[in-house]
């Protein structure tokens, strides 16, 4: 029996709350994780978990053993890291997920520079606007624009606020008039980021407080580029990040409106596995993204 691997399996089951979740985290089959834990219990001559059809919970002995195992694994990881970290060359496959618009406009050059610096890393960059489970879908790094979410299995690293603005084309504003207050949006054509099922309400905040507005939504999309082009085409008012509409505003194709009111802040975040020692390829990619994007954009 590989005792360290069995200890890692045991601690992962405790942290993940079950054998199936631990197996996903470790990249092993459920039966393999179960075999490691049973072997460890046989070796120790004691039961570490209470098992039922619905849940797995550590026994009192298991809890005490877990506390000691964590320190043992930390010491082992630090010893290995101290020997290998400095001379380790990043290599292998790196899977990255990001929103489509942000990936094209901001992430693509960072990935190209990273690949030039570390040619032994092969990058798979998947761009989509679907909300994914990074662990379930096997991504090493995920970039997400939204409200930060705390998870037990992922580190969420906030990089920079993603400023959003209300904007419309000069042609639309000339023909339909410009709203003077958030309540006026109910009488305008609005372009909403999200799905129809997600609702059609915008919330704006100004010196006079919060203003939740049920908008007259004429278009829903989970892609900001599509909404930007509709807005440029005189189809309505959009609420979008400046990394999507900033260039169009500078060119005069879109104009900011209701500038004294602001939507809730969203943040560009990096999500990656919660390991004590990141692989070199992931750590260097995270550092590259943070270095390039830490300055406020838009």
Image (spheres, helix red, strand yellow):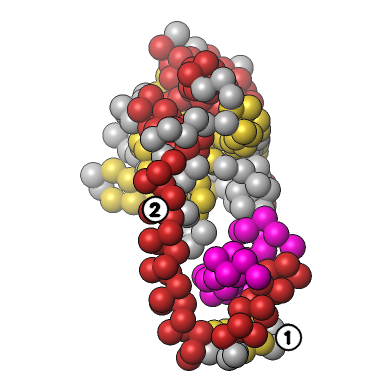
Residue 286 visible in this rendered orientation of the protein: no
Discs 1/2, front = 2
Mark 1 is surrounded, within 10 Å at the Cα level, by few (under 14), some (14 to 19) or many (20 or more) other residues, namely few
Within the magenta stretch, is there residue 11? yes
x, y percent for residue 177: 46, 24
Question: Residue, x 62% and y 58% (percent of image)?
Answer: 26
First in residue order: circle 1 vs circle 2:
1
Q: Is residue 296 above or below residue 5?
A: above
Q: Nearer the viewer, residue 8 or 197?
A: 8
Q: Which residue is mark 1?
A: 53
Task: Pick the residue in front: 39 or 128.
Answer: 39
Quadrant of the frame with the C terminus: top left
Q: Which residue is mark 2?
A: 79
Residue occupying image coordinates x 57% and y 85%: 44
Rendered residue at 67%/80% (across/down): 38
Task: Name the residue nearer the viewer: 110 or 234.
Answer: 110
Q: Are marks 1 and 2 in contact (CB under 8 Å)?
A: no
Q: Which residues are magenta?
A: 1-29
- Residue 37 part of the magenta segment: no
- Residue at 43 percent across and 19 percent down: it is 246
Picture quadrant where residue 32 is located: bottom right
Graded by Cα atoms within 10 Å as few (under 14), some (14 to 19) or many (20 or more), the crowding at tag 2 reads few
Q: Position of residue 167 (x, y in %)?
A: 46, 26
* Helix, strand or loop at mark 2: helix
> Where in the figure is residue 4, as x and y percent of width and height?
55, 66
């Amino acid at each position: 029996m590989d005792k360290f691997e069995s200890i890692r399996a045991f601690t992962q089951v405790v942290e993940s709350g079950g054998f199936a979740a631990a197996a996903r985290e470790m990249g092993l089959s459920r039966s393999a994780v179960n075999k490691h834990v049973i072997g460890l219990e046989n070796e120790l001559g004691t039961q570490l978990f209470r098992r039922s059809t619905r849940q797995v919970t550590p026994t009192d002995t298991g809890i005490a053993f877990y506390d000691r195992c964590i320190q043992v694994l930390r010491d082992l990881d630090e010893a290995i890291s101290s020997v290998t970290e400095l001379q380790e060359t990043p290599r292998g496959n790196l899977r990255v997920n990001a929103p489509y618009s942000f990936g094209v406009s901001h992430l693509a050059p960072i990935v190209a520079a990273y690949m030039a610096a570390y040619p032994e890393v092969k990058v798979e960059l998947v761009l989509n606007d679907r909300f994914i489970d990074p662990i379930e879908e096997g991504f090493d790094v995920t970039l997400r624009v939204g409200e930060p979410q705390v998870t037990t299995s992922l580190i969420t690293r906030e990089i920079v606020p993603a400023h959003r603005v209300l904007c419309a084309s000069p042609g639309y504003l000339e023909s339909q008039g410009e709203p003077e207050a958030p309540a006026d949006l109910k009488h305008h054509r609005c372009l909403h980021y999200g799905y129809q099922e997600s609702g059609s309400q915008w919330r704006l905040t100004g010196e006079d407080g919060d203003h939740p507005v049920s908008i007259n939504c004429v278009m829903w999309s989970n892609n900001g580029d599509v909404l930007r082009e509709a807005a440029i085409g005189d189809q309505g008012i959009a609420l979008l990040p400046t990394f999507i509409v900033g260039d169009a505003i500078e060119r005069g194709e879109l104009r900011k409106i209701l500038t004294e009111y602001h939507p809730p802040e969203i943040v560009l975040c990096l999500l990656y596995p919660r390991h004590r020692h990141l692989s070199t390829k992931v750590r260097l990619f995270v550092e590259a993204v943070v270095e390039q994007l830490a300055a406020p954009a838009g």
